[in-house]
Amino acid sequence: MSKDTAIFAGGCFWCMVEPFDKMPGIISVRSGYTGGFVENPTYEQVCSHTTGHTEAVKIVFDPEIISYAELVNIYWRQTDPTDAMGQFQDRGDSYRPVIFVHDEEQRKIAEESKKALAESGEFDKPIVTQIEDAKPFYEAEEYHQDFYKKNPERYALEEMGGREQFRNQHWN
């Protein structure tokens, strides 16, 4: 089995796991922190907006079953790509939308996808999601992992914070 890695930030990481977790070819989806300058940050540190990190998910996948381009497409459908300062009810730099790329092939796919989205006419505002080089990824505390399975009621409340309505308006 081949393995590759994708890292996406799209607001609260609790809401970014399930859409990928249920797809064929996904080996694992882990919540964590990346993009900052503090090693091994805690949730409390990241929430203080002093680490430079953003909440993200690290996806290990089999590219023979699901492509990176397909993952990028799933990513767009979970986020508001026109909002640079957070996602839905989650505000601030630790919730900014970013596609973290591991190599030039991922960068090319992400940039082409972003350009196509911008040209699609789906959004009235510019697409502001950043595409950045991947930095060290630090797994979040265990209670954050698979949150949608462990705490479905709280997860449902998070989804109702604007993400679900946005998806229905723009993608369904």
Image (cartoon, rainbow, N blue to C red):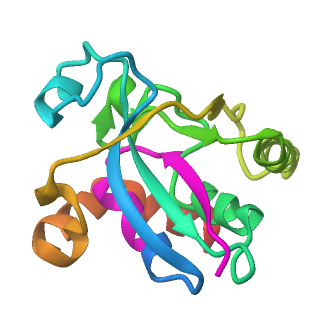
> Residue, x 72% and y 31% (percent of image)?
126
Residue 19 lies, in percent from the top left, at 46, 72
Q: Position of residue 64 (x, y in %)?
A: 75, 80
The location of residue 118, given as percent across then percent down, is 81, 42
Position of residue 70 in the picture relative to residue 21 (left or right): right
Q: Relative to residue 83, is residue 36 depicted above or below?
A: above
In the image, 112: left or right of 17? right
| View extreme (front): residue | 1
Reply above or below: 98 against 74.
above
Number of marks drawn: 0
Residue at position x 45%, y 33% in the image: 136
Say which quarter of the image contains residue 4: bottom right
Q: Nearer the viewer, residue 72 or 116?
A: 72
Residue found 25% across the figure and 13% down from its top: 50
Magenta includes 5? yes
| Left or right placement of residue 133 versus residue 97 in this view | right
Of residues 59 and 92, the one drawn nearer to the viewer in this rendering? 59
Q: Quadrant of residue 134?
A: top right
* Magenta run includes residue 33: no
Q: Nearer the viewer, residue 19 or 164?
A: 19
107 shown above or below 150: above
Image quadrant where one finds the N terminus: bottom right
Residue 23 position within the rendered picture, expressed as x and y whole percent measured from the top left: 54, 82
Residue at 58% x, 54% y: name it: 6
Range drawn in magenta? 1-18
Quarter of the picture containing the C terminus is: bottom right
